Image (cartoon, rainbow, N blue to C red):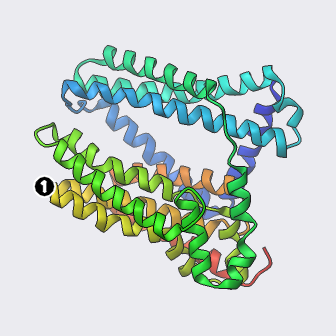
Amino acid sequence: MANRLIRYDARLLRRTLADGFRGPADIVLLLVMAALALAWLRERIGAAPPSLPDEAIWLAALAGPAAFAWHRLARRRLAYLAEHSPVAAAALERQSRLGYLRLAHALAAPLILAAAGLVGSAAGRPAAALGVAFLAYGAGAGLAQIMPDRSRRGTMAAASTAPAEAIGAGRRAVLFLILRRQSLGRGPAFARAGLMLAASFALTLAAGWWGEGRPEALRVALLLSPSFLLLLMAARLDAGLLAFLPAAGFRPGFSAFAVSALPAASLPVAGLAAMLAGAGLAALAVLALLHLGFILLGIARAWLYPGRSARSVDVQLQLEAAGLAVTAFLLPPLAVAALLWRLWHFHRRCRDLRWMQP
């Protein structure tokens, strides 16, 4: 592997995995989840595919936004490497950058196209779904390549240089900083969070009315879309601030409350809008599970950031979330037990770091 950027990130990934799964219990959990994932895949391969309406092939067009986001993420990673890594010179070379981007798409594209193929098979038109996904993926990646990549370092710096002042001012100031990060900007964070909730309510209500008479799967997807976008924005957390909170004496419970306040407020708002739009119990249950998943993931990140790099935490939680999802399909009680055990482990770790120098 000649590309220095790829070698550098591969080594970081190995260290990240070693940092996230260093204990015997962590390794056993990872192995159990891997075995369950293999069992689930074996069962799915032999099972009959689900049936979807013909219109479901247009879900393959989501490959476009996925490719756009993935390409932008890779470009931001290259920008970071060019400024804050020992391989900065390679990150500025055109050929090295192109090789890095090609590898990024070589890893993501097969997975996205495979998902599109499964949707197309369930709808009875796999070739059409693959064609839609292929064109959408190329368009999304191309658009991301030609668009200027505006750096957000100013916002990040503003959020990460304020912890000491905010912590000195009290819990309200810390909550303000976290909401400001989640609501994508500066200024009155509480008012902007309220506007986000109001917009989510209106869009969910409109989506429910517009989806009347359409296939149930499409209607549920429309109902979930506004909440999903809000939860994605609320998933933006300042790792530096959260890592400093235990050292300043804040308990894990406050960190959990601060990062989950906006997602938790979104659940009754979106649920009320969905009920007014005539959503059934199944749609409301999926909506609740979506919010619960984002809330628990945010809490886990807040409890793991102290003493860890944001990159290693996010990689670990992505792997654990995937393993828990597979376990939930096969053995739901085991998945619930594993989730509670991991949260207890993360809470204890964060509690033990209270008042300690970060």
Position of residue 130 relative to residue 71, above or below, is: above
Q: To which quarter of the image does residue 2 belong?
A: top right
Q: To which quarter of the image does residue 20 belong?
A: bottom right
The N terminus appears in which quarter of the rendering? top right
Task: Identify the secondary structure beneath mark 1.
Answer: loop
Residue at the (40%, 31%) spot, across then down: 62
Question: Of residues 206 and 265, which is closer to you in this image?
Answer: 206
357 on left or right of 58: right
- Whether residue 10 can be seen here: no
- Image coords of residue 90 (percent x, y): 85, 30
Residue at the (49%, 59%) spot, across then down: 234
Residue at the (29%, 68%) spot, across then down: 268
- Image coords of residue 166 (percent x, y): 68, 77
Mark 1: amino acid:
Gly
- Image coords of residue 72 (percent x, y): 61, 35
61 on left or right of 54: right
